């Protein structure tokens, strides 16, 4: 069978492609590609697709996708796209925080325990839900109401036993004044927090 020039050229090209493919497979490090982890929250205010992911405070990736999971209960599932060099142990905890006082929300990851294996591509890590601001405000209101009630009861008590505690009147008046001032200060604090909730994140 006579081999034509066209066939020779085709064989040479095919051989070159095979050699190039083998060389590429041997020299390409597939671990250089970023990898994905997942985590779930009950409440994830402030996070969005492309929000920053940090490990011990250092940016290592972004949130690739956010979706709802409805079974067996409603959860928010986040898919994280992480840098190839970022190593997180499988017992790492995901949490939500913000940069500075009024900065953007980001997803933080703890390193995890050194004696645990590293999380693999596609693994799901545990999470820690943030405290909802509305729950904090409800607790603040409840404490303020309790202070008012206690102050009222204390006034009634000191009024009813006025003769018995005559010798301690000065101390009681001082205590009552301090309680009243504490109640006023707490009310002012709670009103300020309702208007400026970011102050709860401020570190003096």
Image (cartoon, helix red, strand yellow):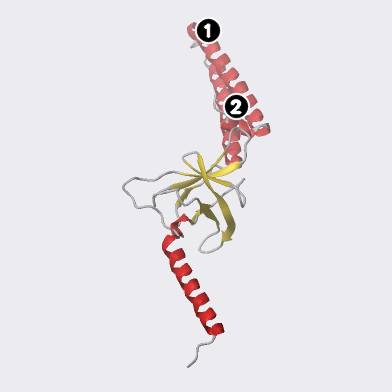
The residue under the point 59% across, 42% down is 105
Distance of label 1 from label 2 (alpha carbons): 22 Å
How many other residues sit within 10 Å of disc 2, few (<14), some (14-19) or many (≥20)? some
Image location (x, y in percent) of residue 89: 39, 49
- Give the residue at the far left of this rendering: 115
Residue 138 in view of the camera: yes
The label shown at residue 148 is: 2
The residue under the point 45% across, 49% down is 85
- Residue 192 appears in which quarter of the rendering? top right
User: Who is closer to the viewer here, 29 or 11?
Assistant: 11
- Check the image and report above or below for 138 versus 158: below
Decide: marks 1, 2 in contact (CB < 8 A)?
no
Image location (x, y in percent) of residue 97: 55, 40
User: Who is closer to the viewer here, 81 or 177?
Assistant: 81
Residue 123 in view of the camera: no
Q: Is residue 119 left or right of residue 146?
A: left
Image location (x, y in percent) of residue 45: 61, 46
Assign a secondary structure to mark 1. Answer: helix
How many other residues sit within 10 Å of disc 1, few (<14), some (14-19) or many (≥20)? few
- Check the image and report above or below for 164 versus 93: above
Circle 1 sits on which residue?
A: 170
- Check the image and report above or below for 121 versus 190: below
- Check the image and report above or below for 123 versus 8: above
Q: Which of marks 1 and 2 is nearer the N terminus?
A: 2
């Amino acid at each position: 069978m006579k081999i034509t020039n066209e066939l020779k050229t085709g064989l040479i090209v095919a051989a070159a492609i095979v050699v190039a493919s083998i060389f590429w497979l041997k020299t390409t490090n597939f671990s250089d590609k970023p990898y994905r982890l997942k985590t779930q929250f009950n409440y994830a205010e402030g996070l969005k697709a492309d929000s920053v992911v940090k490990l011990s405070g250092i940016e290592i990736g972004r949130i690739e996708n956010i979706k709802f999971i409805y079974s067996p209960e409603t959860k928010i599932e986040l898919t994280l796209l992480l840098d190839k060099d970022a190593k997180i142990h499988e017992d790492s905890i995901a949490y939500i925080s913000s940069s500075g006082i009024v900065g953007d929300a980001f997803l933080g990851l703890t390193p995890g325990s050194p004696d645990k294996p590293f999380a693999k591509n596609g693994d799901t890590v545990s999470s820690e839900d943030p405290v909802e601001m509305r729950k904090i405000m409800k607790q603040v209101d409840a404490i303020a109401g309790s202070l008012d009630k206690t102050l009222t009861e204390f006034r009634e008590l000191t009024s009813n036993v006025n003769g018995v505690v005559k010798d301690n009147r000065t101390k009681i008046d001082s205590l009552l004044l301090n309680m009243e001032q504490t109640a006023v200060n707490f009310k002012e604090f709670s009103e300020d927090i309702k208007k400026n909730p970011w102050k709860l994140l401020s570190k003096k």
